[in-house]
Image (tube, helix red, strand yellow):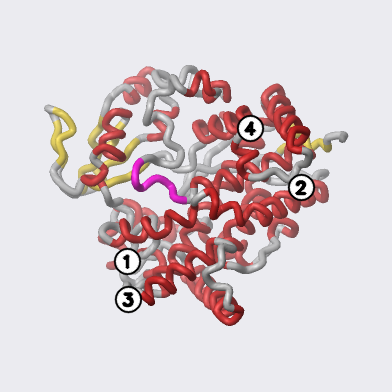
Amino acid sequence: MRQMNEYFRTPYIGIWLFWRPALIINSPEIARRVLVKDSGSFRNRLVGSGDSDPIGSLNLFTINDPEWTNLRRRLTSTFTAAKLRVLQDYVRSKSKELVQRIQREQKSRIPLKSLFVDYTTDVIGTSAFGVACNATLTGKDPLRSVAEGFMTYSPVRGLGTCCVFFFPELVNIFRFKFFPNSATDYFRKIFKAAAAQREVSGTVGESKDLLDALLKLRKETVENNEGYSEDTILAQAAIFLFGGFDTSGSLLAFITYELAFHLDIQEKVYEEIIEAKRLHGCEDFTPEQLAEMTYFNCVIKEVLRKHTSMGWLDRVAKIDYQIDDKLTIKAGTPVYINSMGMHYNPDYFNDPGKFDPDRFLPENEKDIKPYTFMPFGEGPRTCIGQRFALMTVRYAIAYMMLNYKVQPFPNTPKPEDVIIEKRGMFYSPGEPICVEFVPRIS
């Protein structure tokens, strides 16, 4: 622990990625410079896919400047609160299906991540690709199977992912791909079918879902001779699914598991939801109403602090950049902001291993040091889907809490003792975690 604390308190540490020097940053002040103040000098990521993988290389997560700036600017309007509001009825209906699924299977031990990934795949996949999905109720769906393939480990897949994130210059040599071929083929098939259907019906341009926004973007770029290919548009739908279904599903699993072990906190969340239901006259909450529930959102933030889906934020220095009087990093050097490390630094969060949503109460949150809590990143490259992800998570937790109390099964590991997946791309449970769902009496 002493060595760990010393590591936390070191502003930066140099490492070698085999032949490539890189820098890990533990300082929130330096993180602010890299992510925000001097973000123009750190615009790009090291992560990248190859020429043989257009879907993997053209999406907003992997693409670099100057293409990234133009694409991000065009897509940002898709994720405004007003645009996402059109999806609320669909997300709400899927949350109610989630409750039905729990009701049907409550007597068995339901692995939480699988349960919630079924739900997030439906919500994100249908919004991005415009196809009906039924995994929330049944646990099975063609798109769910494809999404599952994203996270299925094999030695070749693991090596390919490692190269995509840390050695992108090797990707073309070995023809690794960000997405499996089976996923790419399926995406093309359903995307073309959905696009053709909307073209025929004349509904392109109407604000229905994310797919419609992407089709509208393609239409506008064709009219303006900007030349966005179908692969570029399809790549955005694919990354919305890939970047959200597993991370949001894992977040929901960790929220549920933490609440099961902290019944006093769970009861406060439930009381707040019940009060909101009484105040608004029904349980068909709007996204704004869910966002206004103070303690409910403190719990989500605390789980994001303890179980953030990606432990680092990567950037690449565009120019030689002086960190301080002792260090100037060369252009092309990868820089990794150690966000997970700062989330667990006792200098920033007292007793960081403790689950304590009170940290994020308004009177306490103002004292949190800026750039020490970054579950969605910061600066121009912050997660574009943050609002959508939070809406998806809030609806699921609200309806689950309204209908069920959750409590741990005997002899199950505490949240801090859960094995974490060591071969996955994101921070997620590495073992099945389950809770007992106890119906609430109305």
In the rendered image, residue 383 lying in the magenta stretch gets the answer yes
Q: Which residues are magenta?
A: 379-384
In the displayed structure, 114 sits above or below 211; it is: above
Residue 50 has which mark? Answer: 1
* Amino acid type, mark 1: Gly
Q: Nearer the viewer, mark 1 or mark 4?
A: 4
Say which element carries label 2. Answer: helix
Sequence order check: which comes first, mark 1 or mark 4?
Answer: 1
* Amino acid type, mark 4: Met
In the displayed structure, 208 sits above or below 299; it is: below
Judging by the rendered image, the residue that carries numbered circle 4 is 293
Q: Quadrant of residue 75?
A: bottom left
Judging by the rendered image, the residue that carries numbered circle 2 is 99
Sequence order check: which comes first, mark 1 or mark 3?
Answer: 1
**Residue 206 rendering spot, x and y as whole percentages:** 56, 67
Judging by the rendered image, the residue that carries numbered circle 3 is 225
Quarter of the image for the C terminus: give it. top right
**Residue 302 rendering spot, x and y as whole percentages:** 54, 30
Q: Nearer the viewer, mark 1 or mark 2?
A: 2
Residue at (54% x, 51% y) in the render: 82
Q: Nearer the viewer, mark 1 or mark 3?
A: 3
Q: Nearer the viewer, mark 3 or mark 2?
A: 3
Q: Is residue 341 left or right of residue 394?
A: left
Q: CA distance from mark 1 to mark 3?
A: 25 Å
In the rendered image, residue 367 lying in the magenta stretch gets the answer no
Q: Quadrant of residue 289?
A: top right
**Residue 190 rendering spot, x and y as whole percentages:** 56, 74
